[in-house]
Amino acid sequence: MTEWLKSVEPLTLKGQIAVPYTWWVGETGGRFMAALRDHRKILGTKCSSCKTVYVPARKSCGRCFIDMEEWVDIADEGVIQAYTIVHYGHPVQPAKPPFAYALIRLDGADVGFLHVIKKDLDRIKNGLRVKAKFRAERTGTILDIDSFELM
Amino acid sequence: MARRVAIVGTGQTYHKSHRPDVTSREMIKEAVSSALADAELTIRDIDAIVIGNMDHFESINYVDTYSVEGSGGVMKPIMKVTTGGTTGATVAIAAYYHVSSGFFDRVLAIGFEKNSESDTTGAIITCSDPVWDRFSYSGAIPSLATEATAYMEKYGATQEDAALIAERDRGHAMNNPYAHLRRPLTVADIMASPMLAYPIKLGDICPRSDGACAIVLAADGIAQKITGKPAWFKAAAVRHTYTWFGDSTDYNKGLVSMQRASKDAYAQAGITKPVDEIDVAELYLPYTWAGLKWIEDIGFCGPGEASKFVGDGHTHMGGKLPINPSGGVISTNCIGATALLRVAEAAIQVMGKGDTRQVPDVRNAIATGFGGCFWSDIVILSSERP
């Protein structure tokens, strides 16, 4: 299999691309982020056709293909629907392992909200109630919520 | 036997340098909603979707799934097709194949780009081979500038000859409410603009825009029920040459991919004298010299004749063969949408919906896409059912 290595020098070229991005959050996403940052509030939007309440708030309902105008206050607590506990580290992850990613059905919403749980990992179970812990210094990102904690 | 196919609706955003008010998928929805409204259809009437944009431009690689809220692709067959700058024309042609095959009756084709979200040059260099070509022609301008100097030397065309192309297109953009740059630009302005890579100056090159475009295609028998004036596909041709910059173009020979694609397209459409038989052209001209050299390659005039052909006003509004009534790429360049805008604008001309940018009595319209490493796509649309 590797016989050819004896006759050919396996040269490679090392490189990387580093493309900077600035993604516009948009008017709808911006209102959601500002509410997190300024009022520690989680906002959703409700479809006037299928009545689904989405969180984070989004501009249109994909299934009904209509824009959503109705804003809804969502609770900062809810129920764990599903989770995993992460044991490996990676720069892209928002916390040092071990920590949990959880889908949380916040009170007042019809869809899961994806976030992290950092404490009491040995007690996590589907169906347990959790509450958002906001960061003291908030900048208008989804990580203005530091994590969710078991209640 | 393939089915006949027509474009029955078009939609586009008001193109801008940046759209902070919407995300990509929200911007896509604006174009799709407008195309559906134009065809008087709803998303439920759509059987399948083809979508495309530039790889790495927004760092969202699975745009077919990412975009469903905006494209209307929830639980529908949706595929991403990406071929570089030609993407917009390629999604139109892929959608044409979808309908022509008989598998789908009504198909949406979508192109979009938010150039404001990334570094265009940083992203675009990923089109070139990392080992051999990426160090040199980094981005679009140097390779085009090399082509321009070869053309100037061979035919004696001047920088002023080229600048007239941008003056023409930017003048045409004044008639298009959707165009990004709606300020006139004169030959003198272009000559005075900063040199980027000789002979390309700032005024010679396209802008970076945020925008989206969508078109609705329908099969023969259905298209006529949707609109009284469908824009029928008479031809679609795709020619992609090598990715090695040195191989893909003999700069002195011309844009070979466009020569071959147009020859194929004219044969499909039964066109023998393009200038006499085509009423309007929406050409992907990303810089001014393309408006000279490439109209020779597409057969609008002979080699070396473009400066006179354009100078005589044949390609201005009111001329023998108006080019880019929309203002073209020099005025608007949301890259993944750019070639689809050419197809959409050609359809608008055939359907007679051009309003202040309408060319009178359009029977045949030609649209081109340019991209990758000197690649060409060509579409010919007609008011006559082929």
Image (cartoon, coloured by chain):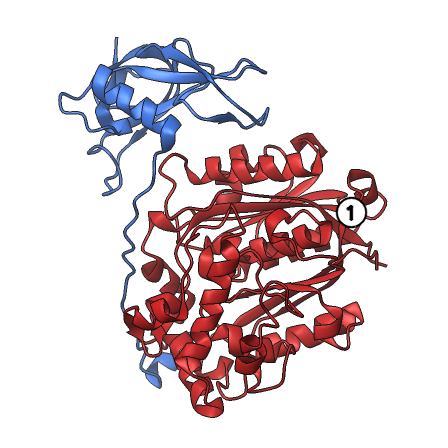
Chain colours: A blue, B red
Residue B273 on image: x %, y % = 75, 77
> As drawn, is B73 to the left or to the right of B249?
right
Q: Quadrant of residue B238?
A: bottom right
The kind of residue on which mark 1 rests is Lys
> As drawn, is B263 to the left or to the right of A61?
right
Identify the residue position indicated by label 1 in the image.
B229
Q: Look at 49% across and 45% down and name the residue there.
A: B63
Is B38 located above or below residue B374 in the figure? above
Q: Quadrant of residue A22?
A: top left
Residue B142 on image: x %, y % = 36, 75
> As drawn, is B303 to the left or to the right of A111?
right
Q: Where, quadrant-wise, is the C terminus of chain B in this rendering?
A: bottom right
Along the line of sight, the residue nearer the viewer: A55 or B194: B194
Q: Where, quadrant-wise, is the N terminus of chain B in this rendering?
A: bottom right
Residue B293 on image: x %, y % = 53, 79
Q: Look at 50% across and 80% down and name the residue there.
A: B248
Let me know if residue B203 appears in the view. yes
Under circle 1, the secondary element is loop
Is B45 located above or below residue A104 in the figure? below
